[in-house]
Image (cartoon, rainbow, N blue to C red):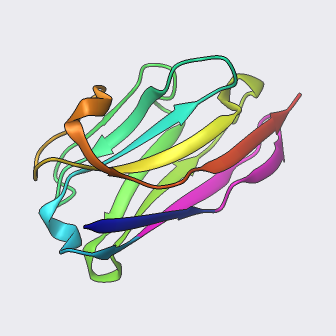
Amino acid sequence: QVQLVESGGGLVQAGGSLRLSCAASGRTFSNYAMNWFRQAPGKEREFVAGITWNGGRTDYADSVKGRFIISRVNALNTVYLQMNSLRPEDTAVYYCAAARGLWTISANTRDMGYWGNGSLVTVAS
């Protein structure tokens, strides 16, 4: 089992920045690629960003490319999502997820083995 806890969400003005953190406990954190998803009210959960177990490869949804940065520190069992130039359409609950494998960066929620409870990000216009 892997337990994931997100933090760092909140209310921010458009154009501002936030950094989300996801702290893992349980099994060895470095055994998993990590992904961030988000879900806005009335919409399906969507992929935001992913990072392989060693941080060697990252990928982003087109909607956040150039604005968001995913990173991880395995020694701290933590993955981060730095969100810059935030827009009202970024408003959502953000979830971190541990993938089923070292290299799995995927937009398919079924490729994820463990989920956090989410952190709400609200971007005011």
Name which residue lies at 65% across and 62% down. 8
- Please say whether residue 22 is one of the residues in the magenta stretch: yes
Residue 97 is situated, as x and y percent measured from the top left of the image, at 36, 49
Residue placed furthest toward the bottom: 75
Vertical side of 43 occupied by 9: above or below: below
| Nearest to the observer: residue 50 or residue 25 | 25
**In the image, what residue occupies the spot 10% across and 49% down?**
101
Above/below status of 117 relative to 16 = below
Residue at image coords 63%, 40%: 93
Decide if residue 38 is on the left or right side of residue 52: right
Quarter of the view holding residue 19: bottom right
Q: Where is residue 83, by image quadrant?
A: top right
- Outermost residue on the right side: it is 125
**Bounds of the magenta segment:** 8-23
On screen, 66 above or below 31?
above
Looking at the rendering, in which quadrant would you find the N terminus? bottom left
Counting from the top left corner in percent of width and height, residue 85 is at 68, 36
- Counting labels gives 0
Quadrant showing the C terminus:
top right
Q: Position of residue 41 (x, y in %)?
A: 70, 24
Q: Is residue 35 magenta?
A: no
Q: Is residue 68 left or right of residue 125?
A: left
What kind of secondary structure does the magenta stretch mostly adopt?
strand
**Is residue 13 rendered to the left or right of residue 88?**
right
Q: Is residue 87 above or below residue 29?
A: above
Residue 119 lies left or right of residue 35; in this view the side is right
Q: Give the percent coordinates (x, y) of residue 9.
A: 69, 55
